[in-house]
Image: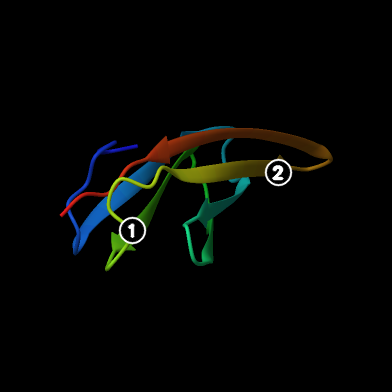
Amino acid sequence: MSNSKPKDYSTVDVWVATARDAGVTTVAHYKTKTTKHTAKANGKGAAEIAYRISDATPGYKVKVSVTVTSGRHTGSCSTSFVPHR
């Protein structure tokens, strides 16, 4: 995460290091909704996915699930952030 405690109405980035050209899916589990983004890692295996924090519940820990797929291989991990006003 670019910032584990982002302010409301800011942007936070999920940084992923994986195999080059791998597919990347992130799912942010907010208190009242779930938001999914997809991307493709670049030739060096890096992907950056931005989440705009807008009116998220302050103090609620938002878990972000990350899944990467390259050929027949799949991996996953998670991270989180806590928005505040």
Outermost right residue: 72
The C terminus - image quarter: bottom left
Q: Residue 40 has which mark? A: none
Indicate left or right for 84 with 81 as reference: left
Vertical placement of residue 18 versus 59, above or below: above
Q: Name the colour scheme.
A: rainbow
Residue 15, picture quadrant: top left
x, y percent for residue 71: 78, 43
Q: Amino acid at mark 1?
A: Thr
Nearest the viewer among 39 and 8 is 8
Element type where label 1 sits in the image: loop
Callout in the foreground (1, 2)? 1
Q: Residue at x 24, y 39 (%)?
A: 5
Q: CA distance from mark 1 to mark 2?
A: 31 Å
Nearest the viewer among 37 and 34 is 34
Q: Which residue is mark 2?
A: 69
x, y percent for residue 59: 30, 45
User: In this view of the protein, can residue 52 be seen by the observer?
Assistant: yes
x, y percent for residue 62: 44, 47
